[in-house]
Image: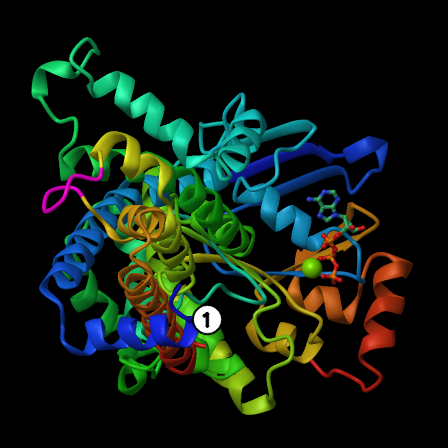
Amino acid sequence: MPTLSSTFAEAFVLLLAFDERVAEIVWLSLKVSGGAVVLGTLIGLPIGACLAIGRFPGKTTLTVVMNGLMGLPSVVVGVVVYLMLSRSGPFGGFGLLYTPTAMIIAQTLLVIPLMAAIARQVVDDAWQRYAEELQVMRFSWWQSVTTLLHDCRHSLMVAVLAGLGRAMSEVGAVMIVGGNIDRATRVMTTAIALETSKGDLPLAIALGLVLILVILVLNAVAFAMRGWAMRRYG
Amino acid sequence: MFPIRVRDLRFQPNGRPVLDGIDLDIADEGITLVLGPNGAGKSVLLRTLCGLIAPTGGTMDWGGGARPERGVMMVFQHPMMLRSSVLDNVALALKPQGVARQQRHLRAMTILERVGLAHRSTDSARQLSGGEQQRLALARAWLTRPKLLLLDEPTASLDPSATAEVERIVREIRTDGTRILMTTHNLGQATRLGDDVIFMSAGKVREHSPLQRFFARPSSEEARLFIQGELPWRLNF
Ligand SMILES: Nc1ncnc2c1ncn2[C@@H]1O[C@H](COP(=O)(O)OP(=O)(O)OP(=O)(O)O)[C@@H](O)[C@H]1O
Ligand SMILES: [Mg+2]
């Protein structure tokens, strides 16, 4: 049984040597989660803004449901998307199961409620302050949505980051719809789970370190951007 | 749109008479000052006129229509400032009219020159001083060429020179053909700007008369006390 320190040492060696397997897995992770967050931004943020601004029956119910779905277990999303994409499912004909596209779809569904819920909160605060003046200027509700999303762009980075954090760190959904196929659908989290179970701890730890590093860097960048925006726009 | 005829206008949320049967005729020219003590209902009246508050009773006649269609703008005491440049904040007002972005910015720039903010156009709106923000808000409203402009205490908490600047702009907007209704607690300002005065208290219009007559011979005892309380010196007309 290797000691903890020797395991970590081996992990660092893997990283420093820029192991190709590691690089491939990291790259796929970034592509899949990044894609999901781009889609989540395009879909989730407007949904959140509409929930903040719109006045329609069932708004409260929808908000509660959206907030509830924030904590949706990723395996559940995985199973649902699996059923949709499997041969006998309604979208089976596209042959997407066990492809990165399927993984993006699953993670998009996973992050939309989270991103929408955060966006709703952020936009709602701004809407309280702007509603009367936008109404007087006769902004349509869609013009209000776009104006507020733009106005809150820096605070909405929080929603984007939360989405990215959730997507990058989940295992269940990508495991089920991607299948953790080597050199095809293996991402950091599924690789870590697999390598740990196989006993290849150095690789698992190397990937874990990269995962943590990526998330830290993203947060640092976002923090710096917000600081800059605060100084620029107040 | 003019004359605007308001009859027995009421706003009574939970039975509390905030507007208690307002009768008002607003002709198509000039600056009307809405005066009265705190809580008289001045701001609520302006909000009702621009459609932000739905009255619980009474009628309004906007030269035929029951509600104003377009051309009514309101500037608030603390105007909203989007987190973007001064120019963007002003140009915003033309967005609902579907004016193209470049055209919006061109026209916004022209109006910024008239309020003396052209040199600040690329600065962040939120970093402007209170007086500059008020001028920005006036520019934003003016840009749409409103027929009726409602100003709610546009110079509260501004220093004398900023106040003078706002008053100059208000006069220019009037000269441009916009009908103005504004509230203020600055009676000196009222005498400098106003053509006529609406005096309100407890949700009612107590008096609506030409400015000079209001200050020289207020018809109600309440208005007389109000003027004395706020204007300890003598006014000579
Ligand atoms: N949207 C609203 N719904 C219910 N009540 C309101 C609303 N807005 C204001 N009021 C109440 O109406 C009364 C009159 O308020 P208003 O703001 O019109 O006074 P004002 O004459 O503008 O006073 P001030 O000089 O202090 O600005 C206040 O008691 C206020 O609490
Ligand atoms: Mg008021």
The residue sitting at 72% across, 83% down in the picture is: B236
Placement of the C terminus of chain A among the 4 image quadrants: bottom left
The residue sitting at 27% across, 53% down in the picture is: A188
Q: Which residue is mark 1?
A: B170
How packed mark 1 is, by other alpha carbons closer than 10 Å (few <14, some 14-19, many 20 or more), is many
Q: Which x, y percent locates residue A216?
A: 37, 71
- Check mark 1 vs ligand 2: CB closer than 8 Å? yes or no: no
Left or right, A113 with respect to A103, comes to right
Q: Which x, y percent locates residue A119?
A: 44, 49
Q: Which x, y percent locates residue B170?
A: 46, 71
The answer to whether residue B103 shows anywhere in this view is no
The residue sitting at 80% across, 56% down in the picture is: B39
Residue B23 lies in the magenta stretch = no
Placement of the N terminus of chain A among the 4 image quadrants: bottom left
In this figure, which colouring scheme has been used for the structure? rainbow
The answer to whether residue A28 shows anywhere in this view is yes
Q: Quadrant of residue B108?
A: bottom left
Name the residue type under label 1: Val
Q: Quadrant of residue B196?
A: bottom right
Is B81 in front, or is B30?
B81
Is B185 in front, or is B54?
B54
Q: Residue furthest front?
A: A1
Left or right, B86 with respect to B189, comes to left
Does the magenta stretch mainly form a helix, a strand or a loop?
loop
Range of magenta residues: A180-185
Is A142 in front, or is B139?
A142
Q: Chain of mark 1?
A: B
